[in-house]
């Protein structure tokens, strides 16, 4: 009788452990963070309740589709975010559906337009895009500071090229211009780095960009000053 009782106790313990493991596994798979709604202009028939939502670039699973309402004809889905990775999704995040290819299942890619915005709140309604080009255009419009920075860097590069082409025939003028560029890199790189650090996306070496921008600025300023001096001498 004691042996039978002992066996029953051990069997009960194993059943309890198995139930706890099953419960924990089910809880781990189920999103525990905020729920959001994603809307597209066109229907996405490939999306199901098993479709994952991944953060752009890092491929981190930030959530999964929990409902695809039939009344919206595939243009709207409900997504549950994982609490641990919910901060990757902000109020300025758009979503691109990547269709299945070969053995790779389809998934929804979260594309941040501006990483400085607040994390998304429970019940938020966000929008999807139809292509990466549309996402990039919306990103430039949303993050206008980074757009102006890119335009400014482009103008400096053009001026830099013009200055090099104009004074390349003279020996000492390029030396002075490069010296001005070195001085700019030495004295202006630190303040420029502080300005552009919050404007550039993650993973970009802001110190290298700051050195390049400071060098180009010093070079262009020196070239302009020398050009003005040459004009006065000719007059």
Image: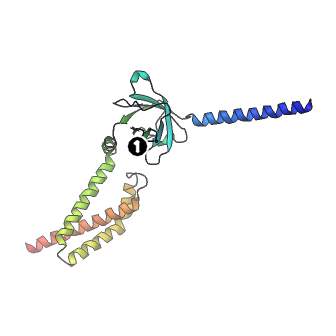
- The residue shown at (9%, 73%) is 234
Give the image location of residue 47, x and y in percent.
Answer: 44, 32
Q: Foreground: 164 or 107?
A: 107
Vertical placement of 212 versus 119: above or below? below
| Outermost residue to the left | 235
Quick one: which residue is furthest to the front in this view? 102
Q: Where is residue 201 in the image (x, y as percent from the top left)?
A: 40, 51
Q: Please, is residue 166 above or below residue 34 in the view? A: below
Quadrant placement of the N terminus? top right
Camera-side residue of 69 and 204: 69
Residue drawn at the location 32% of the way across and 71% of the way down? 182
Left or right: 202 in relation to 168: right
Q: Name the residue under label 1.
A: 112
Q: Quadrant of residue 73?
A: top left
Residue reaching furthest top? 71
Question: Residue 81 versus residue 235: which sits nearer the camera?
Answer: 81
């Amino acid at each position: 009788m004691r042996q039978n009782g002992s066996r029953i106790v051990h069997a009960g313990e194993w059943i309890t452990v198995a139930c706890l493991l099953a419960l924990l596994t089910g809880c781990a798979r189920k999103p525990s963070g905020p729920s959001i709604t994603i809307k597209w202009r066109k229907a996405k028939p490939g999306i199901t309740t098993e479709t994952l939502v991944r953060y752009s670039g890092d491929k981190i699973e930030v959530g999964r589709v929990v409902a695809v309402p039939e009344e919206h004809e595939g243009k709207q889905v409900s997504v549950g975010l994982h609490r641990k990775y919910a901060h990757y999704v902000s109020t300025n995040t758009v979503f691109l559906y990547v269709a299945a290819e070969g053995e790779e299942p389809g998934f929804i890619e979260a594309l941040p337009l501006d990483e400085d915005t607040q994390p998304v709140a429970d019940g938020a309604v966000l929008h999807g895009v139809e292509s990466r080009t549309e996402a990039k255009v919306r990103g430039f419009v949303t993050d206008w500071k980074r757009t102006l920075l890119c335009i400014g860097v482009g103008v400096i590069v053009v001026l830099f090229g013009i200055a090099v082409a104009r004074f390349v025939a003279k020996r000492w003028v390029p030396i002075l211009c490069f010296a001005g560029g070195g001085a700019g890199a030495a004295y202006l790189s630190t303040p420029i780095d502080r300005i552009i650090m919050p404007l550039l996306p993650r993973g970009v070496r802001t110190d290298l960009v700051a050195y390049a921008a400071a060098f180009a600025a010093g070079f262009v300023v020196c070239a302009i000053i020398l050009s003005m001096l040459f004009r006065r001498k000719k007059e």
